Image: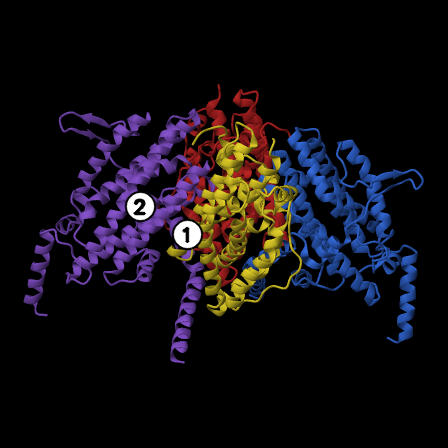
Chain colours: A purple, B blue, C yellow, D red
Amino acid sequence: MSEKEVKNLEEIFEARIARDEKIEPKDWMPEKYRKTHIRQISQHAHSEIVGMLPEGNWISRAPSLRRKVALLAKVQDEAGHGLYLYSACETLGISRNELYEQLHSGKAKYSSIFNYPTITWADMGAIGWLVDGAAIINQVPLCSTSYGPYARAMIRVCKEESFHQRQGFEIMLKLANGTPAQKDMAQDALNRWWWPSLMMLGPTDAESVHTEQSMKWKLKRKTNDELRQQFIDQTVPQADLLGLTIPDPDLKWNEETGHYDFGEIDWDEFWQVVKGHGPCNKERMNARVGAWERGTWVRDAAMAYAEKKEKRKEVSKAS
Amino acid sequence: MSEKEVKNLEEIFEARIARDEKIEPKDWMPEKYRKTHIRQISQHAHSEIVGMLPEGNWISRAPSLRRKVALLAKVQDEAGHGLYLYSACETLGISRNELYEQLHSGKAKYSSIFNYPTITWADMGAIGWLVDGAAIINQVPLCSTSYGPYARAMIRVCKEESFHQRQGFEIMLKLANGTPAQKDMAQDALNRWWWPSLMMLGPTDAESVHTEQSMKWKLKRKTNDELRQQFIDQTVPQADLLGLTIPDPDLKWNEETGHYDFGEIDWDEFWQVVKGHGPCNKERMNARVGAWERGTWVRDAAMAYAEKKEKRKEVSKAS
Amino acid sequence: MNNKNLYDYILGIADNSLILGQRLGELCGHGPSLETDIAGTNISLDLFGQVRSYFQYAAQVSGDENATEDTIAFMRIERAYKNVLLVEQPNTDFGYTIVRQFLFDAYHLLFLKELEKSTDATLAAIAKKSIKEVSYHWRFSSDWIRRLGDGTPESHERVQEAVTDLWMYTDELFHQTDADKAMIAEGVGVDTSKLKDSYYKMISDVLTEATLAIPEGNYFHKGGKQGIHSEHMGYILADMQYMQRTYPNMEW
Amino acid sequence: MNNKNLYDYILGIADNSLILGQRLGELCGHGPSLETDIAGTNISLDLFGQVRSYFQYAAQVSGDENATEDTIAFMRIERAYKNVLLVEQPNTDFGYTIVRQFLFDAYHLLFLKELEKSTDATLAAIAKKSIKEVSYHWRFSSDWIRRLGDGTPESHERVQEAVTDLWMYTDELFHQTDADKAMIAEGVGVDTSKLKDSYYKMISDVLTEATLAIPEGNYFHKGGKQGIHSEHMGYILADMQYMQRTYPNMEW
């Protein structure tokens, strides 16, 4: 293709996006669009499957059968999200094995929040309430993003995430209205998860590298700081309802702006965790890579069996 | 050596044993004596180290610090017994690695009692009281057996075993005088360990293959049935003291014989366990072989390091 | 308790699902592929769902007004759990996990199809609902037996080892306790002795198709149904009961 | 409690021995040789012996007449355990076990030599008695570092990996809690900040001798001393507390 032709295609492409048309896998797309989407969708998919681990950690110890069933279902949903998102990503011409390879080698990232340990049952509440809460704020706008398969996957994901968030809030509510030991547990979980949840909305706008292009492609509709403010404004009243204290002495309602003011985020911690130095980065990667390696013989067997079956079918057809 | 010379040596040898003299490693001994001793001493050594496993199973869950320390010390003693006994066995011209090889391949046996699972804390009491009790009855006569290194090892072993037995009885006593839950636990352990403990004294005399020769060499002073009767006569009053019921409806004092009569032993079970079909035969072997295999690189490193050190010493001497 | 035998009988059924569900739950997020992870979690979910139905019924039957599905699930001592030894065996690898599942599913399916005919309406209803789920479990596990058995030489060897090792726990599935016998006599319980031939045929057919050898061992372990478990059980319970034991008498 | 800081300080010391002793206890009977099994069990025994002395003292200090060495050892919730993250790391293999031991022993020995000078006579006495034991632990672990580091290529690589992985838990040993600071001010506690240089020299010397590289990572984990543990801790406690939680208020 000549440069001019490409330029022409790009113009048509950008115009389609501007008209809110969906881009589909077979459509022409600029290489950068494809790469950016692979990066973001796969990062999202990886976050779902790494995110199974901190919650999976409490399945064997859930305090009631009802909670155990709900937690299993939640972690299963996350695996399901991983599956749709990997599939969406594969439509961009990359295989799931390549995506795993990127995760396992550390080339691809996943949400840093999952590098914090889940050390009490209340963490199951806090993750649902805060982490899924922040995730929804990140994700709802993606339901109308420009790339069709991603947008459709996100519609399904968001619906389930809302359910998870309510479930998490309900765990917190039960604890907050429980015995002193339970209330302590809830407050402690809020203390530990609050700041990492704020960090989930991404670095401050000044530090964020992908914002402008992502806005154009509708991979982003608001800046990180706007999303963070939205999350805080929405969450503070919920904490009040629970009777729990958000661990930020600078947090207060600002009549003028109509938003909550809040304290300084420890960005050093954020970048440390992103760089791989969070409390559980190593455990999470070991768990994923370990599962993958221990599973090699199983996947090989499934493939060999499928091939044999195929061959037998051909033979029986031929004869 | 001519046949006659051998015959002569054998006569001298048997005469020494008859005079209660000890046979030492450098002394001449008949090949059968050597083989029989390797078999018995290694079987005994293997029993000590396999015997670490059922008790080791409760170290992490011991109910008090005092009990945890005592249990650790006991299991450590067993490892120590293993060590003396392997050493005694090595004086007969076989290496510890060869002995392990025999254990791991299933060629060498160990006491079948350790193929039963330890499923409650009370099992720590029952093992000390009953299993060590039966072991002592088997072992005390060996303190004056004919082979010097074995006799000396047994003196040390027996001293510690008596201590273990008292410790086990004390665990039972505390449970028997405790809450109903504790008393149930104690009775349940007695129910499960009673019959296997009786079997520990070996098959009935009619079935026992090694008795006659072993008697002559002072590897045995009493028959299995005599030892079993001794164990029962000694243990029944202890059970009474604990207020526990021995699970044998046929058990009763016989004024005439001055011994307790007792019920039929399930020898089918005994032979099943000996043949490898006990509840934990496979687990025990997996644990031993697994530890050995996982430790290969460590033992190799220690050997390589020792060789390097030796070489360096030579080099520095030479220069 | 008026219905001690019925209570014990319900627990004898449900504890299998409880402990197997727990074992599968341990694996969540650690499977060989996302698809098997989802399936394993799904089976665990189904089993715990069944457990809840059984234990809610058992709580009623117990006559103890403080009994709930959770006190029954979490507050018993080890000797009071009645599951078979098979389901408590460890997740050694995917081969063992699948074989354990396969050997249980075949029994579970045959059992439920009979329990559906129970004169006890509640048990019959739970069975009816569960059959659909367990049919899927059986399809999943037997498909994987075929894949692994007739896959690569390595998978064949590994799954054969698991079959050989776990075979000795199959006979206990058909062992009848006193409560079982009493409930059979009343028409409530399933006479499992009548299922044994179908069971061994059902699994042998799949094993043969999967090019696997049917073990010839004729010694079997039992004890679980009497509460005499393997050494694995204590560790399962230590985790499973952790919260209820550490924070007793609270609502979650 | 009058002596809250002293109580917390004692627990801060003893919990390290408790959890490390527990980890070593898990290995009993599973070591690479009989000799290492005996040595590991012996170290575990020493550590639990020390724990008993510390907790008996803590029980006195607590002012709670129901407190005993066992209630303190077994009846706290996870967030109330004050051990460093290092000691709760898993027994991945013999390399990790030895490196964990080595990194702790060096600190432990330096610490006890200072604690021996404490104005608190009980702590000074426990320290004095423990120094002899811990000197042996240090000899054992540092000897094995040399053997593994300068043994075979495989052992070198494995132990290097363990050193690199566990290095990030060393800095926390010197982290001072409020209770630590208060006790230092009173002359009871050890000012660990003064031990840091000696510590890194002590371990670096052995690592160098063992032909191992000293990790260059300059990020470190902490949290254990504030009761924020790794995900391993819950499982350690589930086993360790199992009996006390399941059968509360009984004597053993």
Split into 4 quadrants, where in the image is the N terminus of chain B? bottom right
Split into 4 quadrants, where in the image is the C terminus of chain B? bottom right
At which x and y percent is residue D244?
57, 33
Instruction: Say which quarter of the image contains residue B22.
Output: bottom right
At which x and y percent is residue B219?
84, 55
Q: Give the residue drawn at x 26%, y 57%.
A: A89
Q: Which residue is mark 2?
A: A112
- Residue C39 appears in the figure: yes
Q: Give the residue drawn at x 38%, y 31%.
A: A186
At which x and y percent is residue B212?
88, 59
Instruction: Say which quarter of the image contains residue A127.
Output: top left
Q: Earlier in the sequence, mark 1 or mark 2?
A: 2
- SS at badge 2: helix
Residue farthest bottom in this picture: A319
- The amino acid at mark 2 is Ser
At which x and y percent is residue A234?
23, 33
Q: Looking at the image, which is closer to me, B127 or C13?
A: C13
- The amino acid at mark 1 is Ala
Determine the CA span between mark 1 and mark 2: 16 Å
Q: Chain of mark 2?
A: A
| Vertical relation: C46 (above or below) C204 | above
Q: Is residue D13 left or right of residue B210?
A: left
